[in-house]
Amino acid sequence: MATPRIVIVHRRTELQELLDRHATRGQAEFFLSTRGRSLQDVQDRHDRLTSALAAVRASVPSDWRQAEVERADLSRFLLTDEDIIAVVGQDGLVANVAKYLQGQPVIGIDPEPGANPGVLVRHSPAAAAALLAAGDVGRLRCLNLTTVTATLDDGQQLSALNEVFVGHASHQSAKYTLSAPSFTQVGGQTERQSSSGLIVSTGTGATGWCASIALERGGRALPAPTDPRLAWFVREAWPSPVTGASLTEGVLEAGEVLRLTVASDQLVVFGDGMEDDRLTASWGQEIAMQLGQRPLRLVV
């Protein structure tokens, strides 16, 4: 087996962003004060992340390789099969990384235990450091979290851990024909729609955006993170003489596909809120959404 490489993923802190924008600490402090905030609070959060990163770096076995990448550079960073991914930050950062993985194990590290839900960042910096210091890749136990994949008819593909969104790039209505599988009707169901877009969510995503939609619709039962099922919802479907609003939610089992044929100039497809890293589908293109073939291997 090749020598493992630890890839440490993090994002720039609010303090770093403020200093980029305002140049000096004094100007940053004044800006925060106009909004009723303290620079010290921002500094404390920066220090906790810096401390967590230092603990992870120091714990990597000496014979392992190391690399670091910021969230904004993930789409340009080349990952290898031997990598172990250490994500230091909020739960959402793990989801941001998931779409670029090919089965590499992920250690989610919470630099502020108690401040984050800890659904995906399950390890404290000290616990993660001990795990890495042991240097035994074989003892990493992983939970396989379901992913969702959207595929365009030209072969372009995008995967996500929480959900995939399809809709217009702005606040305009998305127009398309939706084809969903059905247990009661051979060949499924098809409907022309005009809506605010649709989401297809995993069980991990069922605690976020998908959960709010399900709650508004009477508290629909949603899949668990490891279930081989997806939930889908159409947002604000608009009934008209040529569009319907009856085919607005459902569940995709393993092997089932939700298909959408674009009837707008352009629709966008993105996963886990990363709008800048998206696919664009034009009039007549088909988008197929189904269970992802590669689950996220989250180290527990």
Image (cartoon, helix red, strand yellow):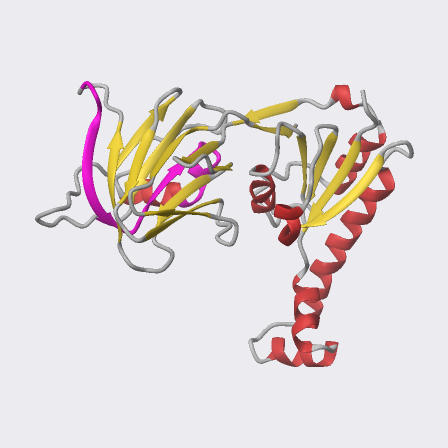
Q: Is residue 218 left or right of residue 113?
A: left
What x and y, as percent, mark residue 297?
61, 27
What x and y, as percent, mark residue 62?
91, 34
Q: Give the range drawn in magenta.
A: 186-209
What x and y, as percent, mark residue 269?
42, 45
Eyeballing the image, is 246 above or below 37? above
Does residue 289 show up? yes
In this view, the residue in front, 296 or 14, is 296
Q: In the image, what residue occupies the spot 38% across and 33% down?
A: 289
Q: In the image, what residue occupies the spot 61% across and 50% down?
A: 115
Eyeballing the image, is 2 above or below 192? above
Does residue 89 show up? no
Q: In the image, what residue occupies the spot 26% across and 39% down?
A: 218
Q: In this view, does 206 lie to the left or right of 244?
A: right
View extreme (left): residue: 241
Quadrant showing the N terminus: top right
**Magenta stretch containing residue 191, yes or no?**
yes
Q: Is residue 81 left or right of residue 126?
A: left
Marks counted in the figure total 0
Eyeballing the image, is 155 above or below 245? above
In this view, the residue in front, 152 or 108, is 152
Quadrant showing the C terminus: top right
Q: Is residue 291 left or right of residue 6?
A: left
